[in-house]
Amino acid sequence: MKRLISIALTLLLLFACAPSKKTAASFPESADVKPVALGFETPEIGGYEDFVCTLSAALLSGTENKNFSPISAYFALAMAAEGANGRTRQDLLRFMGCRDLDELHALTEQMQKRLTRPTETGELTLCNSLWMGEVFPVKKEYRTQLSERYDATVETVAFGTDAAAKRIADWIAEKTNGLIAPAPEAMDFDPLTIAVLFNTIYFRDQWNRPFGSAQPGTFTRADGTTENAAYLHRLTEDTSVVRGEGFLRYSVWYESKGRIEFVLPDEGVALSDLLGTPEKLQTLLSGGEIVRADVDLELPEFTFSDRFELADVLCALGLRDVFADGADFSGMTSVPTRLDRVVQETVVDLNETGMEAAGYTEVIPAPGEAPMPDETEPPLPRIEFHLNRPFLFVIMGSGGTLLFVGTVENPTH
C-alpha cells in the first residue's frame, strides 16, 4: 500500500503527499494533478503582491462568481516550505518571492502580528495546526518549527477512523465560527496518512458608516440577462475614487480600519477583458489616477462560497516538481514525500451591517471625515459607482495587505 502524506489548509488548503520511487519527471497515477493551460507566461515573483496578482490571474476569469484567499494559500505553502529541502524548497520560495527561509520567516511573522491585532467592532482569528498519524513519524524539528514560527497546535490522531475525521471537522468549524463546517467524511484521510496541516481563519467586521436597509434593484450579467438583487446605497461627498483605463476603483471602510475595494468596469467593458494576466491585475489593484468627487455608491448584497482545486494551477505556475516523485520534503519526514492535492474553500457574506468571511484582515488607521468643501470653489463632479454589472472586489488589511480577491458575476447565486 502506498504511503500518503496530506498537508492541508482550511478554508481549506489541502496537501496530500504520497511518496514513490519513480523519477521526479513523472506524476504517479494516484496524483490528482493535471496542469492547466495559462494565457500568460509566469512572471518572476518579487514579493507577496506579485504572488497575489499571478495567482489571481490564473484563477479569476470574470465570467462567474469566484473568491479565494491568496494570503491563506501563502501561509499554507510557507508551512510546507518549512519541511522542504534542496530544489523543492527553492521552488516554493521562488514562487512566494523570497530568497530564503529567513526572508519568508520575517514576512510571515510580520503578517501574523499585523493580522492578529484585536479590534473593538470585529473579530479575527488565525489558527494553524498539525495533525499527525500514528503510522509514520513526523520529524520533531519540523513540529517545533511549526509550533514556534506559526503557533501551530500539534495533534496525533488515528487517520481513517470516524473519531479522527469528526475531531478535525469540529476543529475547522470551531476556528471558522461555523462559517466553514465540513462534513466529517470530508476529513476521512487514508489510515497511512503521515500528517495534515491546517490554517484556519475567520473575519467579521461592520462598516464604519452604516448603510440603510437594502432596496431592490437589477443586476445585469455579462451575457445581458438580468437578476433581481438587493442594493445598499450611500452618497459620500468629497471623497476619493480611482479612475483607470476602462474601470473605476472605490474603497469602503470597516470600523476596525480595514477596507474592501471594488473595481467596476466602464459601461461596455467586460470584466473578463480587464483580467487574464498578472500585469492586468496589478493595474486593477494599484493603477489609475485619484479623482476627488461625490460618489453615489450602489452595492449589491451577496453571499457565496467557493472551492478551488489549486494543484493544477500551482503546477502550471511553476511548482510542477513539488507534485512529482522526487520532491524533497526530508525536513518534514524521512519517508519520501511529494505534494498531491491543494484545495481551498472560502465563504464571503456582504450585507447592510458589514462583512463576514473566512479570511485574513488587520487593523489600520482610517481616514477622518471628509472636510466640507469651500463654497468658493467649483462643485465636485458626481460619480455614479453603481455595481450593477460584473465587478471585482478585494478585501484588504493594514498597509494594503491583500487578503481576498473575488469576482461577482451574479450577486444572487
Image: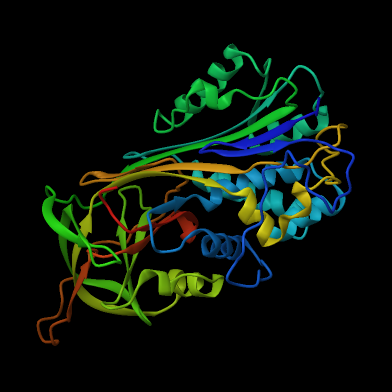
Drawn side of residue 81 relative to residue 292, left or right: right
Q: Residue 276, position in %: x, y?
A: 50, 70
Residue at 86% across, 32% down: 335
Drawn side of residue 377 relative to residue 202, left or right: left
Along the line of sight, the residue nearer the viewer: 299 or 343: 343
Q: Residue 250, position in %: x, y?
A: 31, 67
Residue at 71% across, 19% down: 191
Q: Residue 82, position in %: x, y?
A: 76, 42
The quadrant where residue 163 appears: top right
**Which residue is most to the front?**
29
Q: Is residue 97 visible?
A: no
Q: How is the image coloured?
A: rainbow
Which image quarter holds the N terminus?
top right
Drawn side of residue 375 relative to residue 244, left or right: left
Along the line of sight, the residue nearer the viewer: 69 or 305: 305
192 relative to 121, above or below:
above
Q: Is residue 341 visible?
A: yes
Residue at 86% across, 46% down: 326
Q: Residue 138, position in %: x, y?
A: 80, 27
Q: How many marks?
A: 0
337 relative to 49, above or below:
above
